[in-house]
């Protein structure tokens, strides 16, 4: 099919006309059938609405300023309506065209230099700069990411950039800026958005497309960038911050780590791939700059060779409003400056000398008070009430001792762990072996291309056995691929000792493309084991590591290249030296709570709160009781909640809730096949204007067509993450 792109007229005057125009725009996007009655509640956006068929409509830009009418519409279609300085382009269909991306245009990644067919010299690549502005209110973060693309060539190009975001990011805004004009992207079913983008590209329109390849990996495509021109793309997302051992943690990932894709037809399939199979592999390929396609994977990241440097840099500011005094703030990953606005508020900025995007930005801060109390944040709009609850373990749990443990340490010894990452992991395990008690048992397992163990069964933690374990640990080296499933089988398949609590600890960077298969194997084999994951390195796969711990009813910790491995393991032992609060149940008082996620209440460990997000009805003051057991003793947490006038500052909660529900549906697909899953995720993502495996953002400049034929596709190559060795992780043909 073909698409025509109609521009909205500017300069509309009069409130009455503005309201009518806004309603007409809403009807055009949603479809006339059933949408006009949706003012009382949310409604998904049909992809083939009646308004989009037949003659081309000429809908205007929404410049209405009356707050009530804007609230009614933005509540139904978050992220879909433009502000007064933005344009919204309405797409109409005409003749047929399938708009599929040509095989040679499959998204990859690149940066630094490339060579166009008509040129003999190397010139800079198209991603010039990334600007990040984050604000934190309580434990909710709102982040705006602006990617600045430019064309240094003498002919048109299409830029393709594969980049990371936090796996719990609720991406709900997408704006393309050309000069002073801002064009707001629209959310569509992924296949529909890809067809719109390809058709706009083939017709010479400047267009941009944002797709999700993994919950933490995205592809940005920008078509028809003319020579010397710049195009900015702004992405906005909300997410919840982690809190552990007294510290909040804000993370902004800057580079996708090189994944290993195990052989086999199912390797690395994303959720979308499982329902829309591709001839290519569904993993994430890691190849040298300029060697597109050699990995055989649908998504491919190109990496700079040693000694190459991209012109792409990053600026980043974080505005932290903690509501209580901030006692300490630490950033070990980057050099930062800080400005104290008040005792409760700090503004942190990345120093200009530390702006190479080759590692995650990690900011930790501690607030005043002996400990954080459990707290409830709420927000209410015309769709109903939303909440997020940080549930903190009660004080009395620290007074209870632990029983004997069976500790299984599983070390990733693949090539990507070579050097400092493996040294960090070994230092952490060495500390753990020294902290074992006489009645504990332990096992050491290594995996790369295969798996091997210290012995056929766990050993009692006698001084002699600990010395044997230390000698085995020190002999380990890194080589080969990341066949993590072999490590999982070795760790979870041997018989469990019922007299001891089994903790399986994975120490890995998570650089593997087959996350779904890994999680599925853990689900099938878990039994009574608890899984703790330790992410080791500068840009680890936090999606996989977080989900391993979540699925295994454990916790996750991150060990950066500048962290002390012994201290991280000490924190772990402090956590497991006290029993977890299990068998949780919640009495909500005057609240009626529905659709809470995670749907299965996790256990509470000392120093590790749990964040629950859901929907509610009710108001006024209420008392919430959380009941459970620790070491066969009843334990209770009480939370007082005030629900009147739910704070407007938490307006990101609906998006956070919808993202958590999408993640829950996707997680269940790993081990509960469900043919209705794509439709359920698609409808929810469209209703809340969010990115997902089945939806995508697309923006088109329909005011003009660029000159010349189709442009050359230029991937944006990225640096190898700090601490990762290029020659052991990146595929390259000589």
Image: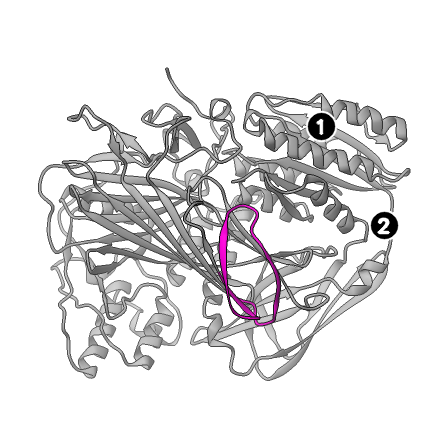
Identified at 18% across, 25% down, the residue is 117
Give me the disc on residue 402. 2
Identified at 87% across, 43% down, the residue is 404
| Residue 634 drawn above or below residue 152 | below
Front-lying residue, 89 or 111? 111
- Badge 1 marks a residue whose secondary structure is strand
Q: Is residue 372 visible?
A: yes
Q: Residues within 10 Å of mark 1 (few under 14, many from 20)?
A: many
Q: Position of residue 20 (x, y in %)?
A: 21, 77
| Residue 722 drawn above or below residue 414 | below
| Mark closest to the chain's N terminus, 1 or 2 | 2
Tell whether position 325 is magenta. yes
Magenta extent = 321-347
The answer to which quarter of the image holds residue 113 is: top left
- Badge 2 marks a residue whose secondary structure is loop
| Residue 60 drawn above or below residue 512 | below
**Is 704 on the left-hand or right-hand side of 264?**
left
């Amino acid at each position: 099919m073909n698409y025509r792109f109609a521009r909205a007229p500017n300069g509309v005057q009069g409130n009455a006309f503005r309201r009518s125009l806004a309603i007409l725009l809403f009807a055009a996007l949603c479809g006339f059938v059933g949408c006009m009655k949706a003012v009382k509640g949310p409604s998904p956006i049909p992809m083939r609405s009646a308004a989009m068929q037949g003659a081309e409509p000429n809908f205007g830009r929404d410049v209405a300023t009356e707050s009530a009418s804007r609230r009614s519409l933005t509540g139904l279609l978050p992220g879909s309506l433009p502000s007064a300085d933005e344009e919204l382009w309405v797409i109409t269909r005409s003749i047929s065209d399938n708009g599929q991306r040509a095989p040679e245009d499959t998204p990859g990644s690149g940066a630094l230099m490339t060579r166009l067919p008509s040129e003999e010299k190397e010139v800079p690549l198209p991603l010039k700069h990334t600007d990040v502005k984050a604000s934190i209110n309580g434990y909710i973060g709102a982040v705006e990411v602006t990617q600045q693309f430019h064309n240094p060539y003498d002919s048109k190009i299409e830029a393709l950039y594969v980049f990371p975001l936090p796996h719990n990011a609720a991406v709900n805004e997408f704006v393309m800026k050309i000069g002073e004009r801002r064009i707001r992207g629209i959310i569509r079913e992924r296949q529909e958005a890809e067809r719109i983008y390809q058709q706009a590209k083939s017709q010479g329109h400047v267009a941009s497309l944002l797709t999700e390849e993994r919950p933490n990996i995205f592809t940005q495509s920008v078509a028809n960038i003319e020579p010397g021109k710049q195009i900015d793309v702004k992405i906005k997302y909300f997410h919840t911050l982690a809190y552990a051992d007294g510290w909040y943690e804000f993370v902004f990932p800057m580079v996708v780590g090189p994944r290993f894709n195990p052989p086999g037809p199912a390797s690395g399939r994303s959720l979308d791939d499982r329902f829309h199979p591709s001839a290519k592999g569904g993993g994430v390929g890691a190849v040298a700059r300029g060697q597109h396609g050699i990995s055989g994977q649908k998504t491919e990241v190109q990496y700079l060779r040693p000694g190459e440097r991209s012109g792409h840099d990053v600026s980043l500011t974080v505005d932290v409003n903690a509501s209580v005094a901030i006692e300490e703030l630490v950033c070990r990953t980057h050099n930062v400056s800080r400005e104290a606005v008040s005792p409760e508020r700090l503004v942190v900025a990345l120093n200009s000398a530390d702006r190479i995007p080759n590692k995650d930005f990690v900011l930790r801060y501690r607030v005043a008070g002996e400990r954080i109390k459990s707290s409830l944040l709420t927000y209410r709009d015309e769709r109903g009430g939303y909440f997020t609850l940080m549930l903190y373990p009660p004080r009395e749990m620290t007074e209870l001792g632990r029983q004997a443990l069976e500790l299984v340490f599983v070390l990733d010894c693949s090539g990507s762990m070579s050097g400092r990452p493996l040294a960090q992991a070994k230092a952490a395990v060495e500390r753990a072996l020294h902290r074992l008690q006489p009645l504990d048992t332990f096992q050491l397992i290594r995996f790369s291309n295969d798996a091997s163990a210290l012995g056929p069964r766990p050993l009692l933690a006698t001084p002699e056995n600990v010395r044997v374990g230390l000698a085995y640990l020190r002999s380990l080296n890194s080589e080969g691929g990341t066949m993590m499933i072999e490590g999982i089988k070795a760790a979870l398949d041997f018989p469990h000792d019922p007299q001891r609590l089994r903790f399986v600890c994975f120490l890995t960077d998570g650089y593997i493309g087959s996350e779904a298969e890994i999680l599925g194997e853990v689900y099938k084999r878990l039994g009574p084991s608890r899984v703790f994951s330790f992410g080791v390195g500068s840009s680890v796969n936090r999606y996989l590591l977080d989900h391993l711990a979540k699925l295994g009813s454990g916790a996750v910790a991150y060990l950066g290249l500048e962290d002390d491995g012994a201290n991280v393991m000490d924190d772990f032992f402090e956590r497991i030296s006290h029993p977890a609060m299990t068998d949780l149940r919640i009495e909500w008082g005057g609240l009626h709570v529905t659709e809470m996620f995670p749907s299965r209440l996790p256990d509470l460990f000392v120093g590790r709160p749990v964040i629950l997000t859901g929907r509610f009805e009710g108001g006024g003051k209420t008392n919430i009781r959380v009941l459970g057991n620790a070491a066969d003793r009843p334990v209770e947490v009480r939370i007082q909640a005030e629900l009147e006038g739910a704070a407007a500052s938490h307006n990101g909660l609906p998006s956070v809730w919808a993202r958590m529900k999408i993640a829950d549906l996707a997680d269940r697909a790993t081990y509960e096949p469900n043919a209705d899953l794509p439709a359920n995720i698609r409808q929810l993502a469209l209703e809340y204007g969010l990115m997902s495996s089945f939806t995508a953002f697309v923006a088109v400049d329909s005011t003009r067509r660029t000159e010349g034929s189709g442009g050359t596709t230029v991937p944006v190559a990225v640096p190898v993450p700090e601490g990762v060795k290029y020659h052991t992780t990146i595929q390259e043909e000589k």
